[in-house]
Image (tube, rainbow, N blue to C red):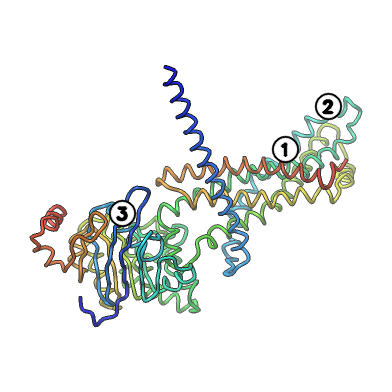
Amino acid sequence: MATDKSTMKETYLQLMYGRFLRSMEEVYNITMFGLRFFKYVLLPPYEIGQVRKHLDELGAKSIPLLTVVGLIMGLILALQSRPTLDRFGAGGFLPAMIALTIVRELGPVITALIVAGRVSSGIGAELGSMKVTEQIDALEVSAIDPYNYLVVTRVLACCIMLPLLTAYVDFLAIFGGFVAEWIAHNSSFQLYFTEVIQSLRFYDLIPGVGKTIAFGYIIGIIGAYQGFNTTHGTEGVGRAATTAVVLASLNIIFLDMVIIQLTFLFLGTGV
Amino acid sequence: MNTDKPILVNVQDVWKSFDDNHVLRGISMKVEQGSSDVILGRSGIGKSVLLKSIVGLLTPERGSIEVMGSQMVGAKVSDLNRVRTNIGYVFQYAALYDSLTVRENLEFTLTKHTNLTEAEINDLVMEQLRLVGLANAVDKMPSELSGGMKKRIGLARAIIRRPRLVLYDEPTAGLDPITAREISELIQDLEEQFGITSITVTHDLECARIIANRIYILDDGIFQHQGDFDELKASTDPYTKAFFQVIQ
């Protein structure tokens, strides 16, 4: 009996070790796949037309969803925070609090998570479908580099579009906060936005915008990697799309945590 | 084999495995310019693997593949691409770019690799479509086409740049016998018309009969037999005999 238990434990450990090795191999592969972007993005041919097309498909088509989310996020933040701030006699700080929370943290992360859900899965499914139907091979035999044509263009579009979408969501969320204040306390538009602008410094904007570029890169690369490595037909395409969203979301949250720590380390807490 | 013609494809002792599955075990073949060679074999035997190795989509573990005098095994991507501009490839399920119209599918490589004007490209596209009998499908999306139509468009796309070599991966798979025969005859017509050299992998004997100058029978990772259609059909070798009988 003791030998059985020992064998089972050994098998379990071997299984876990095998999984760990496979995970590490996957991390290495994604890293190498991602690093190729920095080489390819600088080299011709530049597929400007494709980048423009993806800016529209990946970015502009996310706007309706982001509009709703941005407005509601600001509205809820104001409604939830007002009673607590009032209790400490700090109701007047609400516009500044909303602006800082949105610009520094909630705006970039929520926008990235929503775009990851919509775009990363889309890229994974589209490229996965191209992979299983040999369209990627067809590009390659036509002497067209699939990485440059399919991956670089999409990742670049994500890196360009995400800061713009984040700025849009930030504005809408701050405006949503005003709407809540205006409904509840008939606040002045001028006073609210004066306080918002006075509370924001250049220091608050830089990390917020900077990290959205990194989030865009993660969204594009993970979606493309999953698509490029799709196997097992249509079932694999579905799996690629789902895995792309999960991995992109996890990486966005993890990277955000790292960037916050680095920001605090190099720029201080800003208080 | 008539040796006075130049050799366009020279495959020597090619080995390829996927994990423990040894698909190719020392394949060798020489394809002369203007010849139409067919590789026959059961499904999953490694025919497409050989074709993909020839065009550089897969890299063999051992052996050498020369196409138009250039070594494909271990070549740099830029060198592979230089050779690929002279190769057309017809995929098993056509592999048309499904986000592009038929016109855009055909224009694609021309816009990337040539300096032709828009009018010249349009003329070429329409000419190819007329050759394959689908001029009226020019603005259709691939999803609107039948299997046979997709194959024809795939064929038109492969030959639009007048490549010296065309590789066909199961050109008649999944088609009814009448359409399969039409596709085979179309391939033969186009090859004669443009002097194309070709390698076709198939398990369709009728297709092989129509287009092949030379047939290779692939099994167990090597070419078991080779010859023209009539030679192989008349062969007394048990495997070749069984192969022809089973498929027929």
Numbered disc 1: secondary structure: helix
- Find disc 3 in the rendering and name its residue: B23
Of B49 and B143, nearer the camera is B49
Q: Amino acid at mark 1?
A: Met
Residue on which disc 1 sits: A73
Which amino acid type is marked by label 3? Val
- Distance from disc 3 to disc 2, alpha carbons, whole Å, reads 71 Å
Along the polypeptide, which appears first: circle 2 or circle 1? 1
Q: Residue at x 40, y 54 (%)?
A: A133
Q: CA distance from mark 1 to mark 3?
A: 57 Å
Q: Does the residue at mark 1 contact the one at mark 3 (Cβ under 8 Å)?
A: no
- Expressed as whole percent of the image width and height from the top left, the position of residue A145 reads 50, 64
User: Which residue appears at 8% of the width and 60% of the height?
Assistant: B236
Q: Secondary structure at mark 2?
A: helix
Q: CA distance from mark 2 to mark 1?
A: 17 Å
In the picture, measured across the screen, residue B200 lies left or right of residue A239, that is left
Label 3 marks a residue whose chain is: B
Residue placed under numbered mark 2 in the picture: A83
Q: Nearer the viewer, residue A176 or B14?
A: B14
Image quadrant where residue B40 sits: bottom left
Please determine whether, in this image, residue B84 is positioned above or below residue A206: below
| Residue B136 visible | no
Same chain under badges 2 and 1? The reply is yes
Q: Amino acid at mark 2?
A: Pro
